[in-house]
């Protein structure tokens, strides 16, 4: 297993998705953030089943950056309860993982 993760979150507009993607990459908490959409989401909210059009953000990061990454997403996310889920990257092309490493905040920079 690698130290890398893929984090997902959803928002209600492409503009909000691009805002989050730019922020996490700009802070070097993500090497890449991909925006997909629109997608259709169905979920429970306030005692009812809701459906909405959303935009999905796939964020490539590292496990030790998750708390800072999650904090930044929560700070700028428009939802009361944002979906922020991290999945481990079990394997990956070495060249891509090396590229990610070169574009993420280094461990010594965390908290600076």
Image (cartoon, helix red, strand yellow):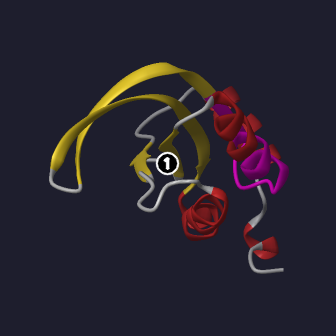
Magenta includes 40?
no
Taking the spot 79% from the left edge, 75% from the top edge, the residue there is 108
Q: Give the image location of residue 106, x and y in percent.
A: 78, 63
Q: Quadrant of residue 64?
A: bottom right
Q: Can the viewer see residue 98?
A: no
Q: Quadrant of residue 35?
A: top right
Taking the spot 76% from the left edge, 35% from the top edge, the residue there is 99
Magenta includes 25?
yes
Q: State the extent of the magenta-drawn residues as a range.
A: 21-34
Q: Give the image location of residue 89, x and y in percent.
A: 45, 41
Q: Can the viewer see residue 8?
A: yes
Report whether 10 appears left or right of 74.
Answer: left
Badge 1, how many Cα within 10 Å: few under 14, some, many 20+? few
Report the residue marked by disc 1.
2
Q: Nearer the viewer, residue 99 or 72?
A: 72
- The image shows residue 62, relative to residue 42, as above or below, that is below
Report whether 102 appears left or right of 77.
Answer: right
Taking the spot 62% from the left edge, 63% from the top edge, the residue there is 65
Q: Give the image location of residue 66, x and y in percent.
A: 55, 63
- The image shows residue 37, relative to residue 34, as above or below, that is above
- Quadrant into which the C terminus falls: bottom right
Report whether 38 appears left or right of 95.
Answer: left
Q: Give the image location of residue 25, x and y in percent.
A: 77, 46
């Amino acid at each position: 297993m690698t130290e890398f993760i893929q984090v997902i979150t959803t928002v209600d507009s492409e503009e909000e998705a691009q805002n989050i993607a730019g922020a996490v990459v700009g802070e070097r908490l993500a090497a890449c953030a991909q925006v997909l959409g629109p997608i259709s989401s169905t979920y429970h909210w306030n005692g009812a089943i809701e459906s909405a059009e959303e935009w999905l953000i796939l964020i490539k990061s590292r496990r030790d950056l998750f708390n800072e990454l999650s904090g930044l997403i929560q700070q700028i996310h428009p939802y009361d309860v944002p979906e922020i889920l991290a999945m481990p990257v079990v394997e990956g092309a070495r060249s891509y993982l090396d590229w990610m490493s070169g574009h993420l905040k280094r461990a010594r920079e965390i908290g600076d």
